Amino acid sequence: MAQQATPVRSARLGRTLGPEPAAVSGVVLLLPSGDETSLRRPSAVRLPCPAKALGRRLARAGRRDGLAAHLVHYRYRGWNGSEAHLAHDANWAADEVVRRYGDVPVALVGVDMGGRAALHAGGHEAVNSVVAIAPWLPEEDVAASPEPVKQLVGRRVLLVHGTNDRRTDPELSFRLASRAKKANREVCRFEVHSDGHGLHQYRSEVQALAEDFVMGALFGRALSRPVQDALAAPPPLGLRMPLASGFGARKR
């Protein structure tokens, strides 16, 4: 009996979140969480997905501007060391956007391990902005190569982290933002005081911040004053900007 070949896994884009615009002029790719090490397929069980919920909000906010939002479905659950599977899948997704929609700006929005994937894939030529929410980053090792930041030059970058996060270290995202800011002025970071990894207490504010940032980056909408101040402020001020309670409430 002939041996059956093992099927090759491939990443894919989910359906557009919300109605697909007649003419797409910008795309958001939502990169969900993952594991540090796992070759298993991402779970097909329908669980709450913070990235997907945020994607729906962004799709509504950008509908009049021609925004298409897609959730990225990874090949594997894990980052898997030097294989960096999630980053490669994010890069593939940006390639797929170019194939489908042509020369349109892309925003990468990642949560947890998806935040790390967004930062790594930020160098794709179609990407003009990156949002990393509570990004999982490895412990810094002076003997090893640090997380790359040069690929973020020319992109607008936002990091958001809860100060009480016990899953992903907020100090590591601050250090990465500090290194990125030296090469790129368009980097800012907001701290959500007393909130944890899921940012449940200030979920609405975090979503409003991401919306403000992405709509400004993709479509040139005016940024809120706190985001303008964070981008303009020298380190560490613009990298430890507190996210105020009620941020974005006037827009809803």
Image (spheres, rainbow, N blue to C red):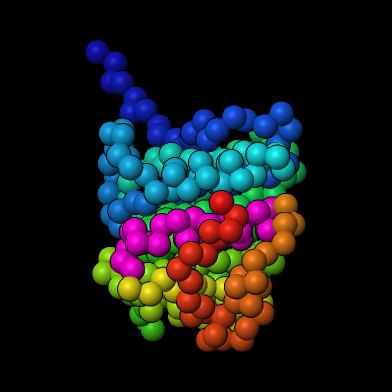
**Which is more toward the observer, 96 or 226?**
226
Q: Nearer the viewer, residue 118 or 54?
A: 54
Q: Residue furthest front?
A: 250
Residue 4 quadrant: top left
Can residue 117 be spotted in the picture? no
Q: Is residue 60 left or right of residue 219?
A: left
Residue 150 at what x, y percent from top left? Answer: 60, 71
Q: Quadrant of residue 162?
A: bottom left
Q: Position of residue 86 (x, y in %)?
A: 43, 51
Q: From what the image shows, is residue 2 above or below residue 42?
A: above
Q: Position of residue 71 (x, y in %)?
A: 48, 40
- Residue at image point 56% right, 51% down: 252
**For the stretch drawn in magenta, what is the main secondary structure?**
helix
Please tell me which residue is depicted at 31% across the width and 34% down the height of the picture: 46
Quarter of the image with the N terminus in it: top left
Give the residue at x 29% y 16%. 2
Q: Is residue 79 left or right of residue 205?
A: left
Number of on-image labels: 0
Q: Which residues are magenta?
A: 195-218
Residue 238 shown in magenta: no
Q: Residue at x 57, y 80 (%)?
A: 238
- Decide if residue 4 is on the left or right side of residue 230: left
Residue 95 sits above or below residue 244 on the image = above
Observer able to see residue 35 = yes
Q: Is residue 180 above or below residue 115?
A: below
In the image, 85 versus 199, the foreground residue is 199
Q: Position of residue 226 (x, y in %)?
A: 60, 73
